Image: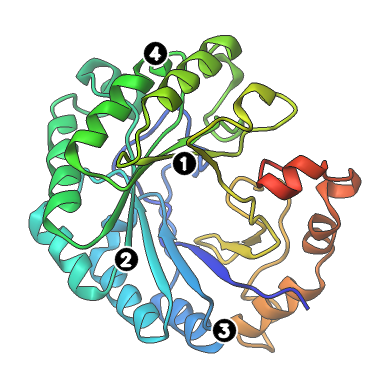
Amino acid sequence: MQTLKKIEFQLTSACNVRCIYCINDDGQKTKDLPQEVIASIIQALKPQKISFTGGDPLIRLETLLSCISIAKANGCVVQVNTNLELADEKVIRALVDAGLNILHVTFDTLKPKVYTQIRQTKPELLNKVIANLAYAANATTLTVIPEIVPLKLNVRELPEIYNFVSQIGVDGLEIQALILGGRATSELAPLRLELVEQVMEVAQMIGSNEPYLELWCFSCTEFPELFGLQNVRYAPCNCGRELAYIGCDGTIFACNFFYQQKAGNIFEPKTKEPWQNLRDIWQTHPTFQKIRQGCFGEKLCQFAHEKAGCGF
């Protein structure tokens, strides 16, 4: 039986920014996942890792802090995904005190003008995000991981961003491939060759004591040059194999990027507890079963399976 090791909760659909590449195009209506439901799932299933995302989970800070404490008390590694605009030193310290392990931060540019273009927010807020990122990396025990999504607007900043985050002491930098859907369209995508060149340049910058570089959701068939690079990690695709994503309305997905394939809802049937519905859907729903067979019927290439490249 496949073990559900990781659960990602969309704590809220509300967000303080409106990133042009966001997969969660939820509109203006805010939806929140109830704290008591999150707590019951964590306490019943006790997965190895819990992640909280949004929107931005800092919008529901008190609920987030309570959920982090519950997850920590049940032996989970806890991660928060945030744009960090709503944080300050006090908020970051509260996250640490609640038991947070990993702070995962969207960080796409060092240029205020580009920041505004991507985030649809005030350019001066970039300085606040940088200050928060530096404080978390230097003044706490958190594992701090910024993530960049390469676009036409920022792809040439990759080496500069890697150099900058290295200087402020983060643990690693993740490069997340642009996933089409929500607000993200192909018009935002960088030129393939330009992206490859920039990633290769960053890979050459990495020394023994430098932050790691990790690629997420890159296809080994579309970007074969990026696989096998020295000093580069390839994130394992846990979608539906170890991971389940719970949307703010209770919808279950194999991961948040797999939004086209709904695998049921934790609130249905009403005769069972949400954690029971999640457990049963995880074990028996065709979406999860097909993923575990590989690529929705397409055989996973050996390299993707062994090296953790994208299997889709």
Instruction: Report the amino acid beneath label 3.
Output: Leu
Residue 221, percent from left and from top: 75, 28
Task: Name the image colouring.
Answer: rainbow
Question: Badge 2 is on which residue?
Answer: 101
Residue ID at (43%, 49%): 29
Give whichever of discs 1 and 3 has the lower sequence position.
1
In the rendered view of the protein, which quadrant contains the N terminus? bottom right
Residue 199, percent from left and from top: 48, 23
In which quadrant of the rendered view does residue 177 lie? top right
Residue 289, percent from left and from top: 83, 63
Q: CA distance from mark 1 to mark 2?
A: 31 Å
Q: Which label number is shown at residue 45?
A: 3
Give whichever of discs 2 and 3 has the lower sequence position.
3
Mark 4 vs mark 3, foreground winner is 4
Q: Which label number is shown at residue 27?
A: 1
**In this image, 142 relative to 217: left or right?**
left
| Residue 119 position (above or below residue 80) | above
Instruction: Report the amino acid beneath label 1.
Output: Gly
In which quadrant of the rendered view does residue 292 lie? bottom right
In the rendered view of the protein, which quadrant contains the C terminus? top right
Give whichever of discs 4 and 2 has the lower sequence position.
2
Mark 2 vs mark 3, foreground winner is 2
Q: CA distance from mark 1 to mark 3?
A: 32 Å
Q: Nearer the viewer, residue 200 or 119?
A: 200
Q: Nearer the viewer, residue 123 or 303?
A: 303
Q: Are marks 4 and 1 in contact (CB under 8 Å)?
A: no
| Residue 59 position (above or below residue 190) | below
